Amino acid sequence: MEKYYIAALCAANQIGGRRIKLLIKFFGSAKEAWQAEKIDLANSGLPTSAVESLVLFRKEFPYAPEKLIEFCAARKIGLCSIFEEDYPPILKEISSPPAIFYYRGNLKPFAERIAVVGTRENTLYGKQVAMTFGEDLAKSGLTVVSGAARGIDIFAHTGALKFGRTVAVLGCGINFYKPSDPKQKLLEEIAEQGLVMTEFEPRTPPTPKTFPQRNRIIAGLCKGVIVVEAGEKSGALITVD
């Protein structure tokens, strides 16, 4: 139950991983933080704007943790918090690891992972290289990580699925795509053979801000990043940085 309170807290604006840790340290648990009075939230060390944001969110969605439990159970969505054993230890090493993430599939927290990323506007050469990297890395026992975006990402995932395991890190909610969407079919295949994950609330749409956030997780899960094709100013190079 605790992880659902963490997720509910994270759903409020201005509440991220560092502030979750601050709240849990002060109150003893995410549940106590969720139920805390406004004056106690202010005394916890949260900035005033974050306190106001959390209080407003709680007022609008008073049963957010309970609703989240029901929603995830009905759709077979897993939830993992940074305090659990199944949380990938390598991901904890980045400066801002997600406090929680939603997922479908098999976590395998200690898997050896390599990212393959690149442009949505790929050439035929880029498609062939991404597919080959995906196939060869998976064949060698490595897990291929990418962002499930059109172009290089999709080809890397597709190649990996032929011989092994792949992880898709989404820049939107795990329940955003409709069953009729062609991408949803690929994500279902990935979940069966690997993992689909995201830190965003299940129905969150993709935005220009969510993709850079997503990219730090791709990099954080992996021992290295392969860029197949990318522009000088691109999400792929944000992942490299």
Image: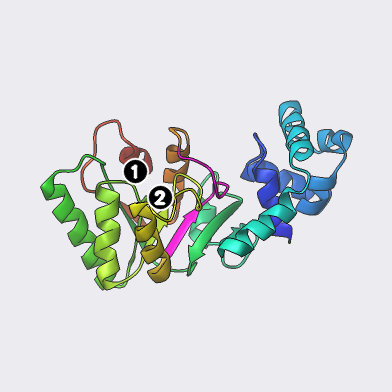
Q: Going from the N terminus, do you reach mark 2 or mark 1 first? A: 2
Q: Nearer the viewer, residue 186 or 138?
A: 186
> Label 2 is placed on what type of residue?
Ala
Is 145 placed above or below 41 here?
below
Q: How many marks?
A: 2
Q: Which residue is mark 2?
A: 219
* Mark 1 neighbour class, 10 Å CA radius: few under 14, some 14 to 19, many 20 or more: some
> Label 1 is placed on what type of residue?
Val
The magenta-colored residue range is 195-206
Q: Residue at x 27, y 61 (%)?
A: 158
Q: Which residue is mark 1?
A: 240
Q: Nearer the viewer, residue 150 or 116?
A: 150
Left or right, 74 with reference to 66: left
Left or right, 188 with reference to 22: left
Q: CA distance from mark 2 to mark 1?
A: 7 Å
Q: Residue at x 43, y 32 (%)?
A: 208
Contact (CB < 8 A) between labels 2 and 1? Answer: yes
Q: Evaluate whether residue 72 shows in this view.
A: yes
Q: Main secondary structure of the magenta part?
A: loop
Determine the secondary structure under disc 1: helix
Q: Looking at the picture, how far across and down is residue 145, in whole percent?
A: 36, 57
Determine the secondary structure under disc 2: helix
Q: Residue at x 44, y 63 (%)?
A: 195
Q: Looking at the picture, how far across and down is residue 193, in whole percent?
A: 38, 70
Q: Looking at the picture, how far across and down is residue 124, in whole percent?
A: 12, 48
Name the disc covering residue 125, or none.
none
Q: Within the image, what quadrant is residue 188 found in? A: bottom left
Q: Residue furthest left?
A: 125
